[in-house]
Image: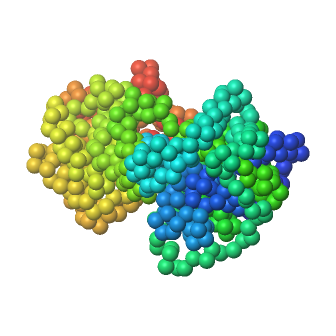
Amino acid sequence: MTRGRSEPTAERSWPILSWVPGYQRGWLPFDVIAGLTVCAILVPEGMAYAQLAGVPPEYAFYAAPAALLGYAVLGGSRQLVVAVSSAVAIMSAATISGIAIPDTPEYIALTAALAILAGLLSIGAGLLRLGRIAQFFSESVLVGFVFGLALLITIKQIPKILGIEAHGDTAILLVRDMIPKLKDTDLLTLAVGVACIVAMVALEKVLPRIPSALVILIGAIAVSVAFGLEAHGVRVVGPLPAGLAGPSLPHVGLDALPLLFAGALGIMLVAFAEAIGPANEFAREHGGKIDPNRELIAIGASNTGAGLFSGFPIGSSLSKSAANDRAGAKTPLSLVTAAGATALVALFLTPLFAPLPEATLGAIVIVAVSSMMKVAKMRQLWQLRRVDFWLATIALVGVLVVPTLQALGIAVVVSLVMLVWRASQPRLTFLGRANGGVEPADLGIEPEEALPGLLVVRPDQMLFFANVAAVRDAVIAAAARVEPHPTVVVLDLALTPEIDVPVVEAIGDLDQRLASDGIELWLAHLQPGARDLLDRAGVLAILGPDRIHPRVPEAIVAFALRTPGGDELVAVLTDVLAFVRGRAGQPGTSAESVEILEALDARLSLELIAAGGPGAQASSRGAQDPGEAARGASSPRSGDDDSRVSG
């Protein structure tokens, strides 16, 4: 028994144990091919993204292997690739460029420190089980933010394509600096860049399974050597040092950490947000379950590893993950293969990249980030919900007009504001009796099931300080317009497990204001946390036990029993009695439940006679007449004890 419990715990702590012990030999060719495919895409994109982050191209070879191995050991997805990311690279550059000059030793050390700090924050968030933070980042806002990042990255690559120098913290400043320099455009560099873009787009359409970036990289190197492009003014990457960096802590003082914190937090959020969606998609397609907290830890370990090996911050890559999946990856061994292949490139092949035109790297980046510009998704937001479209647009424009970190802050604030705004809107469901029984029915769907004199209201979200005043006012307005005028309002708190002091005060105020109109307030489905605070505040004592009910059906029964005599009371009591007898006669009903239902049967029978109805001689102990049996069988009922009606 102990062993059975410890194995799943070990797998949760070390996800690698979920696939290594049961690894099948037939998976190996798929994982190796998938890993080599990932490496073929990673090498050219990594060199380009390193420059995007403001560090030399070879630093991609330092960051990628550690990141890949970190996720292979701790990650929960068997297809996701965590390595270099354009979005994270541009955020890294935005953080460090305000502190140090790109390509300098100080800049490189700060970049590595940023990766480590982002990783530690992510690991800490995972250990604190904060994996739900992605749910507070509006998907619409994220679509706009990523779209804006893609545009910003594209604009930053245009000077490489044109062969000019241009600088600026925002897209607007960059374009303003670029326009006067357009007259200095190097036509040969422009031709190389445009030809690479056109060739990559064509290859992806004609041969989608071929790593187009690698083909263009090899072709550009060959053309550069054959025609001596550097001698004709085309800028090239130049000599790259061979080898891998060893693990070490970056030489950064503690006084730099506060300057890095905001950027590290932003990188943690973006890296997690862009990883958790694809990870869940792969889990749905291939089976399995993704633990968001475990993903935070895995991504954090990958970033920390990248920083310890002098790399730059990393994130997940949708393009490389999709290629990994298409190539047939069965397990994270494909990531191990990709890490090994990338290391071999760094050790033995870096001299081959010296004649590579920088315009080619710019073209690779532009084509790679073009998939982040989700025009169809923006169109869908416009068609489905204009509010979400404008939220995405605000995030998109924010990235272009203000520095990246401030734009991320705008995106987060907009998401939180929308969360609070939506939660503060009073969404209420009004309930009646389903098919004449005592189970509640939505009056919006079945308005004929209303119970005259009784208004049952269920808030469709948890009550808290931001929405309780609006809910209170909506309940009062509904009670005023209902005909006939209700004598009782039942507030169903099934969706409110905990309450705060403003909710307590609002419930007390609701009771007083309804009482001034001759209406009693009843509460149903009080959760323990809510009940405790209402009790300590004295609200339950004011209401009294007769106005507190376990569930809505009990409140309906209590209302029926206190209603003055007449045809309506007879009808209600007859329906309730038929429902109770149907439940008592159900197969599998426990003896305790039968005893409770029979006691309620006897009480209801007496109430029915007192109300002037026909005698209820047939009890649940004896035979029912055919009409009553049919009514009892047709009453809606659930199959568990939560649906029983207690007296």
Residue 22 versus residue 328 in the image, above or below: below
Asked whether the viewer can see residue 462, the reply is no
Q: Residue 491: percent from the left, percent from the top?
A: 28, 46
Q: Would you identify the image quadrant in which residue 568 lies?
A: top left
Whether residue 536 is visible to the viewer of this picture, yes or no, is yes
Q: Is residue 224 left or right of residue 32?
A: left
Q: Relative to the observer, which residue lies in front, 580 or 3?
A: 3
The N terminus: image quadrant: bottom right
> Is residue 120 left or right of 528 when viewed as pictured?
right
Q: Residue at x 56, y 46 (%)?
A: 163
In this view, 78 is above or below 262: above
Nearer to the camera, 599 or 320 = 320
Q: Residue 276: x percent and y percent?
A: 58, 49
Q: Residue at x 73, y 58 (%)?
A: 239
Quadrant in the picture for residue 600:
top left
Residue 305: which quarter of the image? bottom right
Residue sticking out furthest to the right: 25
Image coordinates of residue 573 in percent, x first then y, are: 31, 32
| Residue 535 shown left or right of residue 253 in the figure | left
Taking depth in this image into account, of 507 and 80 the one nearest to the observer is: 80
Q: Could you tell whether 243 is left or right of 414 in the image?
A: right
Location of residue 248 in the rendering, given as x and y in whole percent from the top left corner:
69, 74
Q: Residue at x 48, y 30 (%)?
A: 376
Above or below, comparing residue 373 to residue 346 in the picture: above
**How many discs mark residues in the rendered view?**
0
